[in-house]
Structures are given as C-alpha cells and as structure tokens.
Amino acid sequence: MASSSDHTAKIIDGKAIAHTIRSEIAEEVRGLSEKHGKVPGLAVVIVGSRKDSQTYVNTKRKACAEVGIKSFDVGLPEEVSEADLISKVHELNSNPDVHGILVQLPLPKHINEENVLGAISIEKDVDGFHPLNIGKLAMKGREPLFLPCTPKGCLELLARSGVKIKGQRAVVVGRSNIVGLPVSLLLLKADATVTTVHSHTKDPEAIIREADIVIAACGQAHMIKGNWIKPGAAVIDVGTNAVSDPSKKSGYRLVGDVDFAEASKVAGFITPVPGGVGPMTVAMLLRNTVDGAKRVFGE
C-alpha cells in the first residue's frame, strides 16, 4: 500500500464493534433467561477508593445492566486484610448466582496479588488471569476456560476488520501479564510469527518495521512513530496515556503508545485512542461471563 500523503488507514472503530457484540450478548442473555429462568452474574471486587478503579467498576456495572447480566458489587476498605479479601473471594466462588469474579487491580501494597487471583475458582476466572488458564493458553492443543479480556478484544478487532493473522509477522510491544504476554500467546495460537519487543530490546524500530500486525501495549505515550510502521500494517494500540493539555477541562487528554496522526498515514488499519481497545475489553468481559454461565446451565 502506498504511503503517499493522501493515504489514510482504515480506522478500526472499537466502540462500534463493541456495540455490535453487546447487542449479540443481550440477545443471548434474553434467551438464557427464557430457557433457564436465570441470568449470568458477574461479581466485581474493588479494594479501596482509587478514582480510576471506581471509574472502571462503574463502566462494568453499566455494561452489565445494559445486556441483562446481574451485577454483584463488593467494595472493601483499603486496609482490608489479605485473609479477609480471600475469604470474600471464596464466598463468591460458592455463590451459584455468580458465574464470573473480577478483582479490580491494582490491589493495595500489603496484599499479595498472586494469592488473591489464585483463590478465584478457575470456572469463574472471567479475567483469564488464573495461572491454570494462562498455562493452558501457552500450551499447544489445550484450551483455557477463559481468555484475558483485552488480548481477546485485540484479536476480535482484527478478525472483525478482516485482518488475516495466520502466517503474518506480528510484533507485540510490551510483555505485561495483563496484555503483552497473553496477546503474544493468542497470536501464536492463531498461527502468526510473533516477536515481543520490551525495554531491553535492541533497535525496536527495525523489528516493528517488519510487522504486518503491531500490538502496542507498553504504556509509553507515542513511543511508536509513524515511520516505524510498515505500509499497510494493522496497528492495535492498547496504550492509554494521559498527557497534559491545557485546552481540555480536565487538563489532560488520552493518547496511545502509537503516534496516531503519523501512523494513520502509513498503516492499513489502526485503532484510535480512546475508542479502540477500551470498549472491547468490557465487551469481552461480558462475553466471558455469559460463556461461564452457559457452562453452568449446561448449554
């Protein structure tokens, strides 16, 4: 594809795709309710009062209401002990109306995240972070019960935009447990040739330039420049970085890990920030919750 100045990438509208998925889910939930007299249930556990965590939780609660999933909100004080938090998780594990459990991260410093996430029943691990789910994701011929929401959303965006993955060169920028690592495993499962770029990678620019698919998840505003992108590549930008902007009421605006203005002159497909991956993450959480309920209902 020519990278002439008049070229603009096809925008992958995560908001619109997520809206379609939510309509599909609402339809499914109605069907389950009519057939079984029960609806899927999602429990969201939040510790403390971090503003960003509260915002995420409210978004999830609204999304559940919109598709007919029952929300169980568990708010615990910042100083809750690890033992008390884990016993709350065990309580939700044994509640038959709860089909998915999500513990909002990050947790306060005095709580060991690994212990808490490991306490969630693998059948209710809608975040897909249980070591058994991640382990199965990493192994050929095994299927995890749940895939992590953001990585699953990234692949769904590619699939619904008609981007071929099989045999393509994919570069994942970042290796976090939440996005980078699982998305690279998912791409590998989908038969891409996958390279991970991280903070110790020499000459990341040269590696990214080879990519047919770029997944940016490093949390560095505009780290990836437009001239790093191979003409016609598909770019999925997971980054949400606040940069100061006095013209905004909040004093900041959100930008991705990719320089959108420049990259969209070269790429074949690109997601905007915000409005790209974010809405898909919530849609995939709803999808996982419904899938968990369907297993319980014997669907």
Image (cartoon, rainbow, N blue to C red):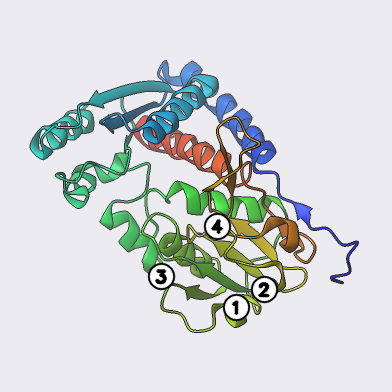
Mark closest to the chain's N terminus, 4 or 2: 4
Q: Amino acid at mark 2?
A: Trp
Q: Residue at x 67, y 48 (%)?
A: 272
For residue 86, what is the image quadrant?
Answer: top left
Q: Please give left or right for residue 38 compared with residue 11 in the image.
A: left
| x and y, in percent, of residue 57 in the image | 40, 29
Query: Is disc 4 surrounded by few (<14), some (14 to 19) or many (20+) residues within 10 Å?
Result: some
Q: Which mark is residue 221?
A: 4
Q: Tell whether label 3 touches label 1 (CB within 8 Å).
A: no
Eye-nearest disc, 3 or 2:
2
Q: Quadrant of residue 132?
A: bottom left
Residue type pointed to by label 4? Ala
Q: CA distance from mark 2 to mark 1?
A: 6 Å
Q: Identify the residue position indicated by label 2 in the image.
A: 228
**SS of the residue at dot 2?**
helix
Dot label at residue 140: 3
Disc 4 secondary structure class? loop
Dot 2: few (<14), some (14–19), or many (≥20) neighbours within 10 Å? many
Mark 1 to mark 3 CA distance (whole Å):
30 Å
Closer to the observer: label 1 or label 4?
A: 4
